[in-house]
Image: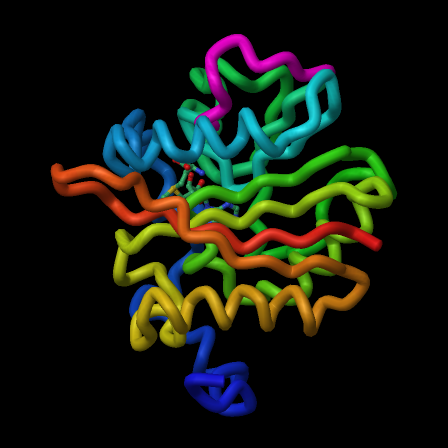
Amino acid sequence: MIFQMKTALSSEAFARIDETDDRLFYAEPRIVTHIDDNAIAAIKEFFDQTLPRDAAILDLMSSAFSHLPEGFPTQRMVGLGLNRVELQVNPALDEYIVHDLNANPQLPFDDGEFAAVVMTVSMQYLTNPVDVFREVHRILQADGPFIVIFSNRLFPTKAVHIWRVTSDAEHAELVQHYFSLAGGYVEITFLDRTPQTDEYTDPVYIVMAKKI
Ligand SMILES: C[S@@+](CC[C@H](N)C(=O)[O-])C[C@H]1O[C@@H](n2cnc3c(N)ncnc32)[C@H](O)[C@@H]1O
């Protein structure tokens, strides 16, 4: 371990500069992308290679874009996030729900309802990540992947302390640790899918695991 996890997971680890209700911060819609085009292309390629086709998929902490490849066949694509307008305009979603995971980590879905769950560039905003990872495990089907993708941008006032003071490599360790603490996941894997290009690109890091 690069840093001491016991310290990392104390309650101070999840403190934020802005502790006001998250719904206030996300009240105004941001119809924007949160990473650059190279990073988005890498995520689309990864989803194309990894996500089950014609299946029920949940996009956790979703917004106006889910980064599914155009025409990717889904049986049911559900988004959960904090801004209704962003979710309404997301072209990938069949359904959406506004739900504050920091106020209530319990997911409003049945056991085994999804074949896969994705969470893109939002990990740093969860204040109860292990509870959320346990809930994702509950709503996944057996063998279903939970794919957590992160980069290096953030809204600093809403990111948890531990994320703000650690490096990309430590973020990868931290997310793997959340999977281990949640329990019931196997094949916990880190992948660096940062595009190989001469231009500047946002990095693309992935930690994923499967429900046993
Ligand atoms: C940086 S955006 C990422 C959006 C999208 N996943 C993407 O890849 O572009 C962070 C998202 O996290 C969601 N979010 C932040 N705090 C949340 C919370 N407490 N509960 C649920 N969603 C939250 C917001 O709705 C916002 O859309």
Residue 157 locus on image (x, y percent): 28, 62
- Relative to 189, is 162 on the left or the right? left
Q: Residue at x 53, y 82 (%)?
A: 9
* Residue depicted at x 58% and y 67%: 176
Magenta stretch, overall SS: loop
Q: Residue at x 75, y 60 (%)?
A: 186
Ligand 1 visible in quadrant: top left
Nearer-the-camera pick, 196 or 157: 196
Up the image or down, 141 lies above or below 130; here it is above
Say whether residue 69 is magenta.
yes
**Whole-percent x and y of residue 46?**
50, 34
Q: Residue furthest left?
A: 199
Q: Nearer the viewer, residue 133 or 48?
A: 48
- Place of residue 81 in the rendered image (x, y in percent of width and height, measured from the top left): 52, 38
Residue 149 lies in the magenta-colored region: no
Residue farthest top in this picture: 71
Q: Is residue 195 found left or right of 183 in the rendered image? A: left
Q: Is residue 90 above or below residue 138?
A: above
What range of the chain is rendered magenta? 66-75
Q: Position of residue 8 (x, y in %)?
A: 48, 84
